[in-house]
Image (cartoon, rainbow, N blue to C red):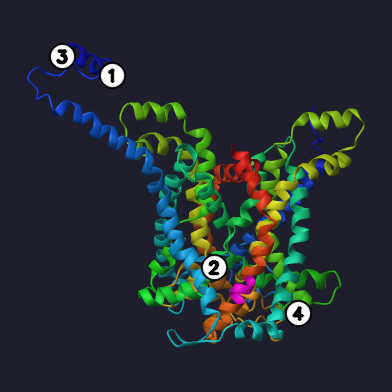
Amino acid sequence: MTIDSMPAVRTGEPPAPSGSPAPVRPERPTWRTRLTRADMRYSPYLFVAPFFVVFAIFGVFPLVYTGWVSLHDWHLIGDHTFVGLANYVELFADPDFWNAVANTFGIFLIATIPQLLVALMIANLLNRALRARTMFRMGVLVPTVTSVAAVGVVFGQLFARDVGLVNYLLTSIGIERIDWQADRLSSWIAIATMVDWRWTGYNALILLGAMQAIPRDLYDAASVDGAKPWQQFWRITVPLLRPTLVFVVIVATIGGLQLFTEPVIFGFGRMQGGTLGQFQTITMYMYENAFQRFQYGYGSAIAWTLFAMVVVISLLNVAVVRRMVRGAR
Amino acid sequence: MRLWRTSPATYLALVVGIALSVFPIYWMFVVATRSNDVVNDLPPPLLPGGELGANVERVFANEHAAFAYGLVNSLVVASVVTFAVVIFSTLAGFAFAKLRFRGSNALLLLVIGTMMVPVQLGLIPLYMLMVRLGWNGELKAVVGPSLVCGFGVFMIRQYAVQAVSDELVEAARVDGCSTFRIYLSVVLPALRPAIAVLALLTFMQSWNDFLWPYAVLDADTPTVQLSLSLLATAYYTDYAQVFAATALATVPLLVVFVVFGRQIIGGIMEGAVKS
């Protein structure tokens, strides 16, 4: 009896009150231990399950089902026939689709290249001993807070043909006013400006965060060797920012390929993107087919093709993702 | 020794940059406080006027846009979404950071993978799904797909790795706390700063969301961005009214930004260091 009760005392349990029924005592700890063990074992899965379940329903299922729908001549809901790859065949021969692809990539290029250069410049300016540091950072970030729809409204006015501020400035320095919506290049520039205005500051802060992680002695050593600030920037800062730059580029690509709201509001809510489709993006073309012409099958084929484009570019990202995980350990 | 001297030129360049980034917002307020005949003047007015009240009144009186309804709807949607994202992200983020379980690495990679997948490309089946559920035209159709977010899980996980102390978790276990109890009384308090940033970013994103609400909602149940786009596309020559609406839709976020700007900036920059 004494020997039996000793381990119980040692593990911190109060000694059994005299007269308690003997068979119950060994069972209570086992039940509790079992419960604790089950808790340790299965709780993690219960904790991550909500995310995966909801994501499966609203994220994975629609994406996969898009592929299925794209293999059908699928008009109004429920009414459909299997057509194999016919939608894709038609799509790849569709000049309107390629027009949208060209617009999307064109706007993406003229938006992203200046955006990254300016973001690098701003980050470099902010990476110094500054008075009112927070104010400057907030000033740079404030466009990101503004909604895309608001950006579309304000810049739509700024780029208006007759009453827009941009044309007013142009004419006041002796340049002809531009009908920004009318041409391919001018409408691309107007839309790229909206994208850049909204995202440059955000990217600058991401780059600034990475710049501040660069060890200072690298620069000290370079100064001792006589490297000028400009050389230090291109030889030390930029190379060491490469992972962050790749990350920023890929995020910009995923967003840029899905460009939708800015051009829609710029074109007064019409999906055609100007009289000749000069600024219709891929997502607008998908929307037009699915939700205005009710060609769900064809619209889904556009979605999947766009998805494939994004995946190809995201695959480049695997290396970056690995870095994110490893860096966190 | 400082890397780069902070010369007056630095300040000048930054001030120019900030002027460019603030001007469109300033311009939005200028037009919102003017009447239309003045807005179209050349040279345009550069100072605010006194017509804000009248313009705002016209916005709310405009039945076509249902602007007040849009504001309320967006508040509801953004609040519910923010609450859900914070709960789901902290649960999963904590599990990935502090609990040991089989397959956790693979599952975490999957979470990061979801950040790269453009979910809005599932627009068409998502719409069909909502029609099947009878949710189209209703706010829950907008809330549903936004309930979880891979970025939130990843961000919380990154923060929890350092912020939640292993000793505290162990001690709570020895005291007989269940995992859920530990989550409530140890993990959530420790994660408070990260939760604040995640909540702010989620709220802003939900408030500003456009494509999916545009596809699934009708004009009579709009979010604020839909009301705005209805106004902007139907009354695009009435700049005073449209800009007043734009200002109304933007002010709540600007207030949040001014109050919590420091935390938001910190969140963005920390994310960069870890990537």
Q: Is residue A86 above or below residue B172?
A: below
Name the chain letter of the residue that bears numbered label 4: A
Residue B31 lies in what quarter of the image? bottom right
| 10 Å crowding of disc 4: few (<14), some (14-19), many (20+) | some
Of the image marks 1 and 3, the number of the one nearer the N terminus: 3
Q: Nearer the viewer, residue B137 or A175?
A: B137
Cα separation, mark 2 vs mark 4, equals 32 Å
Q: Do the residues labelled 2 and 4 touch (CB within 8 Å)?
A: no
Circle 2 residue:
B120
The quadrant of the picture occupied by the C terminus of chain B is: top right
Circle 3 residue:
A1
Q: Which of A222 and B18 is in front in this view?
A: A222
Name the chain letter of the residue that bears numbered label 2: B
Q: Which mark is residue A179?
A: 4
Cα separation, mark 3 vs mark 4, equals 98 Å
| 10 Å crowding of disc 1: few (<14), some (14-19), many (20+) | few
Q: Which mark is residue A303?
A: none
Residue A303 falls inside the magenta stretch: yes
Circle 1 residue:
A11
Foreground: disc 1 or disc 3: 3
Cα separation, mark 4 vs mark 1, equals 84 Å
Q: Which amino acid does label 2 sit on?
A: Gln
